[in-house]
Image (tube, rainbow, N blue to C red):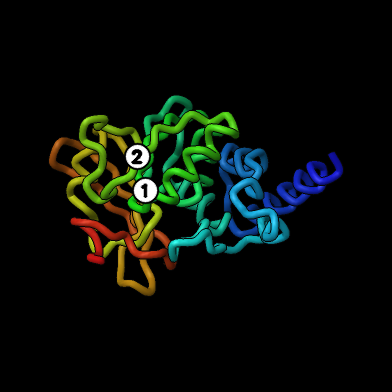
Amino acid sequence: MIDEYKYKGARKKLVEELTTKGITDSRVLQAIGEVPRHFFFDKTFYPHAYVDKAFPIGENQTISQPYTVAYQTQALHIQQGDKVLEIGTGSGYQAAVLMQMGATVYSIERIEKLQVKAEKLLKQMGYSAILKCGDGTKGWPENAPFDKIIVTAGAPVVPNTLAAQLKIGGVMVIPVGDLKKQKMISIVRKTEIKFEQIELDQFAFVPLVGEKGWKN
């Protein structure tokens, strides 16, 4: 009970820190304040769970910095009931934040070990994401179209396969650039063939590996 009280306090401090860094969406901040990020860490590393930084989760992957999770989520403008495709499940933390906000999440992870671990953990936490292991750059055409698409790895270009799976009026948020740094891009599908693209801030993500991304 004492530990849970401590982590609740740590989440509150994290939310306050994210607010000072420019996160303004109250629903995003509320979700960050409610999802127990320490559940996605080995117990040894619990002290790192509410520090605003990325952290290794094995397989050369990381759990994203809370600011990055909040930033991408805010840029998606999530609404209750949104059908969201996430590319790069990783630890499952980003998916949990989206589901905490009322989204239905379909998530693809290329590394089976991480996908299995995330699926088990999310289920234990009471979240019902639809997960699979595969090449995220191809999207999930049998479940398209999606209201929102979030890509949590850096791409060399915007995969046309993903853009094609957005609903008209839908939003995709994806980091695009080289292997060291990327620009966050917000893409809105205006019509069947017209997309509006807005460049946002600069980030550094692990590479998006796949047929339409970086090659292994």
Q: What residue lies at 26% left-to-right and 66% top-to-bottom?
A: 216
The residue where tag 1 is placed is 109
Name, please, the residue furthest toward the right: 2
Q: Is residue 131 left or right of residue 32?
A: left
- The answer to whether residue 11 is left or right of residue 71 is right
Position of residue 48 measured from the top left corner of the image (x, y, whole percent):
68, 61
Q: Amino acid at mark 1?
A: Glu
Q: Position of residue 148 (x, y in %)?
A: 35, 38
Disc 2 target residue = 132
25 left or right of 130 in image: right
Residue drawn where x is 54% and y is 50% of the image: 70
Give left or right: position of 100 versus 184: right
How crowded is the residue under tag 1: few (<14 C-alpha within 10 Å), some, or many (20+)? many
Q: In x, y percent, where is residue 32?
A: 62, 44
What amino acid type should be assigned to the residue bearing mark 2? Answer: Lys
Q: Residues within 10 Å of mark 2 (few under 14, many from 20)?
A: some
User: Can you name the residue that lies furthest to the bottom here?
Assistant: 180
